[in-house]
Amino acid sequence: MSKVETIKERLAAVRETMAKTGVDIYLVLTNDYHISEYSGDYFKEREFITGFTGSAGTAVIMKDEAKLFTDGRYYVQAAKEIDGTGFELMKDGSVGVPSVTEYVEQQLSDGACIAFDGRTVDARMGLKLLDIAAKKNATINDDFDAIAPIFESRAPFPESKAFYLDEKYSGATIKEKLVAIRESLTKANATCHIIASLDDVCWLFNIRGNDVWCNPVIMAYAYIDESKAILYTDGDRFNDEILAKFKECNVEIRPYNSVYEDAAKLKGKLLLDTKRINTRLYNICNANSDLTCIFKENPSVLLKAIKNETEIANLKSVHREDGAALTKFIFWTKKAVKEGKQITEADAAEYLDSLRAKISDYIELSFDTISATGPNAAMMHYHATKENASVLKPEGMLLVDSGGQYLRGTTDVTRTFALGPVTEEMKKCFTLTLKGMLNLSNARFLHGCNGFSLDILARGPLWNDGIDYRCGTGHGVGYLLNVHESPNGFRWKHIPGVNDLAVLEPGMVTSDEPGVYEEGKFGIRIENEIVTKKDYENEYGTFLSFDNLTMAPIDLELVDKAYLDKTDIERLNNYHATVYENIKEFFEGEELEELKMATRAI
């Protein structure tokens, strides 16, 4: 049976269950029970029912219609993957396209029923749906899952062993982090706190795991009050060393799902982050008459985002080795293609992954490597497989977005480089992208600025030529945690709930990645990680700037100096001189000469 026919059968089975239970609108989200950006295989219900394999999207299923909402990163990919399945693509974020909740409100009739699994819907969205239902005298069923009964090939629930991240990597003890959280609770006039977001939980207890591919976390919730902390997960995950550290800090281990039962019995003033807690847990806490809920962002979000001196030193160290591996990959790929070897996008990604795996403290990739040439590169999150990969030809460009998880931190870097002759349009777009990347990474700005303030520096050179890209310019990067980390980021307009309004603080690591994506033709992205640092103070306030963490050459074959001014050229030359000094020790012989050529001044 074809994929299309299989999806149609699944959709029919879901609609049959909806009809039997009186459900009119059924929402299927991509989330796990912790509202994580990336979810383990166990949670792929939305992919199962739609056929769309991207990391972000929501299915809305009704009696006679089925919609898939996804953002600009996935328009091209989603259209291909759901073609003929019975689902229609809704280009979330495009002019004239309603959001998921707006669409539900448009379609909801009086007295109807909206249903979803409340463990996979964040509380903010759950509250919106509740308001929509109230307007139409409709009902909400937040304990509905029509997919689980037919998801026969479902992966097991993740239960990896945890490991402890030593203070020589984390830079702070569990006790120190608990003190910081408790101080934040006192400032917020709260007496207790539930944390559901996996990266916040793992950061707080200095633990990492392997429950989610490319995100080294374990499935867990946490509770903290003035005297104790509870970690809700399987106790068998921890060795004696970790359990001893927990005992020192009065950390108790309780079964994973006990958090729901315990939340109903809590007393006090509870700090809850509605963006990072699921609707079911929110409803339990909100219904508890012995609790006063204080709705604020998890204190750990900001504490985690501001990397300490140990973390920054480790990141600078690992980025040198990571950049050297990427540079060797670029040299190898250019040479192999020029010699006429049969290499596909997937082969290239596999080779780069193998180079990273040789770095001493490598854990895993920080996301599936994106290796894309020609029209494939116009799909921002295209993933080449052995079956669909294009062969690299001695023409055009290859875009490679990749990164690793190491004990010394997380890397995320994109380089686009020439495989052979390129068009003038490609060189122009590449150079304007480069100009924007350098503008932002060389910014000096007053403390108080956020990503919304600075995004224009990266986007401006492209806007001047009537070009844009349908995504943010940058995102926060975790430390051996999520490659996309709140609260810092760069965006040109404010989108409620998205990383763009957080004030940039010294120690925050953010990606700087403008690009050009010409559908059906080519894609370009240049991405460096940058860390905010303090420059100086004067009568106007505290001035900040960025240090580049990423150490890998920009392909000079794609640079057209006609689009660069003197300052741009100086910035590029300075960056390349820094790259050479930082990674030259990893090269010798012919490769060292290639490095000198790749980082030469222009």
Image (tube, helix red, strand yellow):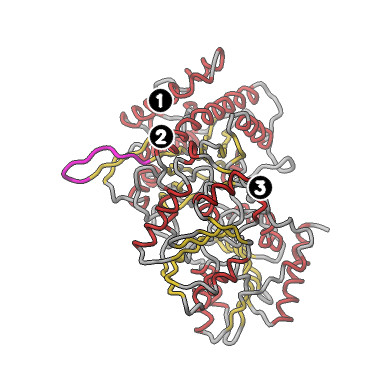
Q: What residue would you read off at disc 1?
A: 578
Judged left or right of residue 580, residue 357 is right
State the image coordinates of residue 351 (x, y, percent, origin top left).
Answer: 65, 31
- What amino acid is labelled 2 in the image? Asn
Q: In front of the other: label 2 or label 3?
A: 3
Q: Quadrant of the N terminus?
A: bottom right
Specify the amino acid type for callout 1.
Thr
Magenta segment, which residues? 532-541
- Confirm whether residue 379 shows in the render: no
According to the picture, the residue beneath numbered tag 3 turns out to be: 161
Q: Nearer the viewer, residue 196 or 137?
A: 196
Instruction: Check the image and name the residue furthest to the left.
Output: 539
Secondary element under disc 1, as helix, strand or loop, is helix
Reading the image, the residue beneath label 2 is 548
Calculate the distance from the C-alpha at mark 3 to the C-alpha at mark 1. Answer: 40 Å
Observer-nearest residue: 24 or 544? Answer: 544
Are circles 2 and 1 on residues that touch, CB within 8 Å?
yes
